Image (tube, rainbow, N blue to C red):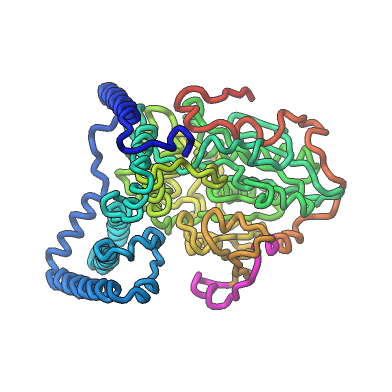
Amino acid sequence: MGKENENLSVFDLKKMSELMVKYVDKQLCLADAFAMNRVETELPEPAVFFDFLEAFQKFALNPETVFNLTLKTMKDYSKASSDVVVDFFDLEKRKERTMTNRRFRSPEWNRNPFFQLMRDFYLINYKNIKEAVASLEDIDPDKKKRVAFYTKQFLEAVSPANFLATNPEIIQHTFDRKGENLLKGFENFLDDLSCEDGTLDIKISDDSAFKPGKNIALTKGSVVYQNDLLQLIQYSPLTQSVFEVPVLITPPFINKYYILDINEESSLIKWLIEQGYTVFVISWVNPSEKHSEKRYEDYILEGQVEVLDVIEQITKSKKVSGIGYCTGGTLLATTAAYLEAINKQKFASLTYMATLIDFSKPGELGNFLDESQVEKTIEDMEEVGYLDGRILGQTFNMLNPSDLVWSYAVRYYLKGKGPIPFDILYWNSDATNLPKKMYAFYLKSMYGENRLKKPGGITIEGVPIDLSKVKVPSYFLSTENDHIVLWEAAFKGALLFPGKVRFVLGGSGHVVGVINPPFKRKYGYRAAELDFDSPEEFLEKTQKKKGSWWVDWYEWNSEFSGKLVPKRIPGKGKFKEIEKAPGTYALIRAEDIVKGTGIQIQS
């Protein structure tokens, strides 16, 4: 804390009065928001409400299950109570008892029998209720998944670790700080409460700690082309000779590209350049209302095909190695199928990082995609012309509520601490909006109807596309703990391609498993040519290797990289440097667009 807070205590009446004034001001502005109908006053009735109603009916009609659950819970309570008594008289045994759950690792939870018992009872309820939901029979699988997901949300929310009176660590912290943390936490809460729409935006990072081009996204390059949707960055070479076939990286359209250049040590972009590749990266615009009519087709034609033509003119290479990350990989697959359909294939190889192509297994994201919620999302977009990317970010955070929601709420509002200056968390909070028309199509056609996998299911400029016609060699990377793109779902997408396919399963999750430079020697991976019919067979017949998948990819892609040619300097040919990387598009934040202060750029 700063010097001005060193002597602060709960009896600091001046500070308390200042906070009360701030609180009243916040209440007044929220009242104005209600009056202007900016705050939602009518609760929608998503399918999950009826799902829970059906689940309760199933339990009511099966009293034996309820009785067995109650009996098991009582036995677990009895054992937990005995453990508390034993631990109270046996200090060594108490010290041996450790928690794998990080919320309860603090020693304060074991020092007091009351808090130990409360913690243990909570964990018993958590486990048994989840098992009860899992045991539900004669209920639609999708409904069951939604009930399980929202039950988990409730159980995470009511954890004793989330409340002052039931968290001994916070109680001790409050005594140590003389209540300063509670005043500061209340101030943090008021700062995070939006007067625009009444939402609470828990800040998970220090937005003032980083800026692309200053202390992140530092690899040298130039913006050599731009249109309404993107800026194309060509990076400066680090070797005298480069591979003839350049690399084009298509990042997710829901995030900024610079996660692939987050810092010098972990930059995939810089590493590729060091290996001798000419690297181009798309930096998507952060859409505003003027982009509302942009279609999924436009992201293919303007965001991919147009860019490929520019790269060919710059490098004189008729082929490109395409790399797509997450939704960028979905765009890449669509583009490859379109180019195949018009007999103008430009890809020498295709790499899909944590990408869904077959959407039949959307994982926990599917819990937000029932028909009523999709229609509500589309209706909300009609008013402003785009989806606020921060809403999507909050959705992703809900997939891991303990780590990405409640841990930060406890940190900011109970401990009174400030945001964490961490580059990946900064990137995670730097959301990208989505145009209304494009995202509505994506929700319905991909997640709703799974049309991309169907021959002719999607058309681009009236041309039906078919993934089964794409014979370009493909490399699929998934990660074991990815909660956004399940690796089993990515595996199903890999099976759609008839050409040479290599499937790789790395460690960790959706971001860290991808951003895994060789020097760290972490996580490891499994890799093999795709001669397997199922994920289970892949696991059974492959061995885990040490190190990073980056090296495996380099060895695989070398076959498709062409000969060595003199290095290419950005801006030397027809396409001059517009500005230095990372470019202006990467600097536009979602909150700037909402406030109407976004940077306007002419193509």
Residue at position x 30%, y 52% from top? Answer: 157
Residue 87, quarter of the rendered image: bottom left
Q: Quadrant of residue 503?
A: bottom right
Q: Residue at x 59, y 75 (%)?
A: 542
**Which residues, given as a range, are shown in magenta?**
532-553
Front in this rendered view, residue 354 or 307 = 354
In the rendered image, which quarter contains the C terminus?
top right
Look at the image and say whether residue 545 sits in the magenta stretch.
Answer: yes
Residue 562 location, x and y as percent?
80, 55
- Residue 117 in percent (x, y) is at 25, 65
Residue 564 image offset from top left, x and y in percent: 85, 53
Up-down relation of residue 281 to residue 74 (above or below): above
Left or right: 236, with 37 as reference point: right
282 relative to 7 in the view: left or right: right
Q: Residue furthest front?
A: 7
Residue 197 at least partly seen = no
- Decide whether residue 108 is among the magenta residues: no
Most foreground residue, 585 or 152: 152
Tell which of 396 and 212 is nearer to you.
Answer: 212
Q: Is residue 537 visible?
A: yes
Residue at 84 percent of width and 45 percent of height: 567
Q: Quadrant of residue 124?
A: bottom left
> Which residue is depicted at the point 75% across and 57% down?
560
Question: Is residue 383 placed above or below 346 in the rendered structure?
Answer: above
Placement of 391 over or under 267, stated as above or below: above
Is 289 displayed left or right of 398 in the figure? right
* 573 over 602 or under it: above or below: below
